[in-house]
Image (cartoon, rainbow, N blue to C red):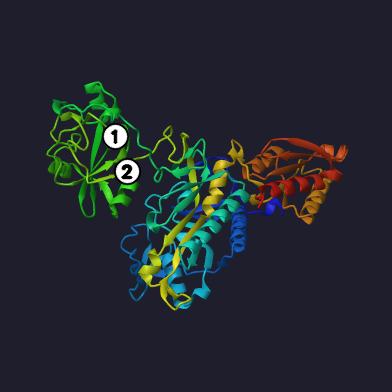
């Protein structure tokens, strides 16, 4: 195709609305345009990339026995009420009414409607297992859409749902999808890590993994072991309790005045102690109760872990009035000793501490030499803290490292959460009725496109991996006025396309510098420069976008050289098995 005919309005300036590099470069490279906050139009080049990712996803789903269908975007509220999610999903659910006043939702996900479909037509164990998937637009009313395609209100997603007879069958389906996802992101040319994760609003009692593209701009923090394969989102990462000073002899408690010392830093500075010797007490409010959560002074509460432990739908820090009512003190002076009106949830590490320092539930007062078990007894003891780099791995003797990641896929073991709520049952070989066991598996297709740019770019623009580049090569005649250059460029361009290489030709009457800048900005993997040497010496230059290497080859060999580079890189992206 001719560049002059492609609708790709490139921009020289950085758009004011853009925050992250993928958003900036997709706007500048003429790949997307904003229609509304969190809603984007894909222009031809951007959509070509999208289609390539979709094709890779489709091929890998089909290889694993997935059957593609298309579910409605508009979903009746009755199904969400049946599952129990209509009132708990939150404000991210786009809700609407038809002319008759009936409630509907724009699908952010499709567990309810696929479960309803399957329960209506699957009766026997002979019809299981099933792997059903779709690739479709999803809708979530994000409070603050941002980062372009990374967190939008409309996005493209592949979602597959597995229906099995039992847990063993689910384990097989889960592993199929786990393996397929590894192949998908490998074929897309991405560096990624599967990490243990929290299931969030999807729910389910089984395991879940997120597939994270490693990038400095990632919203999620992940930790991974320097020795074994353990990796987890920090929301899920298991904490190994420090052995602490449990062998130390217990001392007698004593109240001390700490005027104005509310924060950990203020208390440690006032008392000239380390934060590891303090216990931090935080008061939380759920939809059902107020609780106290305690961790070591240098640790942070993992609110996802705490919320899951409590089984609550909502969790937030209690306001000042509630803190004063519960503790009798100003915020900053809460402590577990004598705190009898509410439940105390202690992090496991706290129980390894001796002669610690806590708030006294009196303003401007703390207690020293507080000992868990002797001076207070928590109702629950569990891992409720955030894990940080440098801590011990929960699986081996290694040390945890930290990185940022962009979630591009997630696999869930749902179990019977939806089948039980919605009555999805089958008859086994003995005629007994049993619940189907489900899993769900999502790939953020549009997110994958953005994540690829976050991982593959430089100061000049995008560096597409060969498998998902909009075109493999751009042929650039240096002089628009030189008919021989144009003729040779056209011949190379035609031969490339005839040989299976996806190529475009920059036929615009522009200066060479403009053409080169646009080629780098858009990110074509190969640039074929047809200049005076092509006419005088019969040679062209082939520049590799990723490495910057430039090769001079004979015009007669150019097509075969380019075809080999493209085929080699496509082959390298294919997993070995």
Front: mark 2 or 1: 1
Location of residue 60 (image quadrant): bottom right
Residue 104 spot, x, y in % from top left? 38, 69
Q: Which mark is residue 27?
A: none
Is residue 259 shown above or below 322? Answer: above
Name the residue: 27% across, 47% down.
316
Front one among 532 and 445: 445
Q: Earlier in the sequence, mark 2 or mark 1?
A: 1
Q: Where does residue 373 sit, x and y in percent of width and height?
A: 21, 38
**225 or 14: nearer the viewer:** 225
Residue 76 appears anywhere in the view: yes
Taking the image as shown, residue 484 lies to the left or right of residue 404, namely right
**Is residue 440 shown above or below 346?**
below
Q: Which residue is mark 2?
A: 384
Crowd rating for badge 1 (residues with CA inside 10 Å; few <14, some 14–19, many 20+):
some
Residue 232, image x, y percentages: 45, 44
- Residue 516: name its quadrant: top right
For disc 2, the neighbor class at 10 Å (few under 14, some 14 to 19, many from 20) is many
- Which residue does the image show at 57% across and 46% down from the upper left? 452
Q: What residue is shown with label 1?
A: 352
């Amino acid at each position: 195709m001719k560049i002059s005919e492609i609708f790709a309005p490139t921009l020289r300036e950085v758009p004011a609305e853009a925050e992250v590099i993928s958003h900036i470069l997709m706007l500048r490279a003429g790949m997307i345009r904003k229609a509304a906050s969190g809603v984007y139009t894909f222009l031809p080049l951007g959509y070509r990339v999208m289609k390539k990712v979709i094709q890779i996803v489709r091929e890998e789903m089909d290889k694993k026995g997935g059957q593609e269908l298309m579910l409605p975007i508009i979903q009746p509220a009755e199904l969400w009420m049946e599952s129990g999610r209509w009132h708990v999903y939150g404000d991210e659910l786009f809700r609407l009414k038809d002319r008759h006043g009936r409630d509907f939702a724009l699908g952010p996900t499709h567990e309810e409607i696929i479960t309803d479909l399957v329960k209506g037509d699957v009766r026997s164990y002979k019809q299981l297992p099933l792997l059903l998937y779709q690739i479709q637009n999803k809708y979530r009313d994000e409070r603050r859409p941002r980062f372009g395609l990374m967190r939008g209100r409309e996005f493209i997603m592949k979602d597959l749902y597995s229906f099995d007879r039992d847990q063993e069958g689910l384990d097989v389906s889960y592993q199929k999808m786990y393996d397929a996802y590894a192949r998908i992101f490998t074929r897309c040319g991405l560096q990624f890590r599967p990490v243990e994760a929290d299931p969030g609003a999807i729910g389910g009692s089984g395991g879940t993994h997120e597939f994270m593209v490693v990038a400095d701009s990632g919203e999620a923090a992940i930790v991974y072991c320097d020795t074994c394969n353990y990796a987890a989102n920090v929301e899920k990462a298991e904490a190994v309790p420090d052995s602490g000073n449990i062998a130390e002899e217990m001392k007698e408690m004593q109240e001390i005045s700490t005027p104005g010392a509310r924060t950990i830093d203020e208390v440690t500075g006032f008392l000239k102690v380390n934060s590891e010797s303090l216990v931090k007490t935080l008061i939380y409010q759920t939809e059902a109760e107020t609780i106290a959560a305690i961790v070591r002074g240098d640790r942070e509460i993992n609110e996802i872990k705490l919320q899951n432990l409590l089984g609550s739908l909502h969790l937030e820090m209690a306001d000042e009035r509630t803190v004063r009512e519960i503790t009798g003190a100003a915020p900053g002076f809460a402590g577990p000793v004598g705190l009898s009106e509410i439940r105390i949830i202690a992090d496991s590490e706290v129980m390894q501490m001796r002669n610690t320092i806590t708030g006294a539930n009196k303003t401007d007062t703390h207690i020293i030499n507080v000992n868990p078990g002797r001076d207070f007894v928590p109702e629950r003891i569990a891992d409720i803290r955030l894990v940080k780099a440098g801590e011990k791995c929960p699986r081996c003797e290694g040390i945890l490292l930290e990185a940022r990641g962009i979630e591009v896929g997630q696999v869930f073991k749902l179990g019977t959460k939806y089948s039980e709520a919605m009555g999805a049952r089958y008859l086994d070989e003995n005629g007994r009725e049993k619940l189907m066991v489900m899993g769900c598996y999502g790939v953020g297709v549009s997110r994958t496109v953005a994540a690829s740019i976050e991982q593959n770019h430089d100061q000049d623009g995008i560096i597409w991996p060969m498998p998902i580049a909009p075109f493999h090569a751009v042929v650039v005649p240096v002089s628009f006025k030189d008919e021989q250059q144009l003729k040779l460029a056209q011949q190379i361009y035609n031969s490339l396309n005839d040989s299976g290489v996806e190529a475009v030709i920059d036929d615009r009457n522009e200066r060479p510098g403009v053409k080169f800048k646009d080629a780098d900005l858009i990110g074509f993997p190969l640039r074929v420069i047809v200049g005076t040497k092509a006419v005088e010496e019969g040679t062209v230059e082939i520049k590799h976008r990723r490495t910057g290497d430039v090769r001079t080859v004979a015009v007669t060999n150019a097509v075969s050289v380019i075809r080999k580079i493209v085929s080699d890189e496509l082959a390298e992206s294919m997993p070995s098995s």
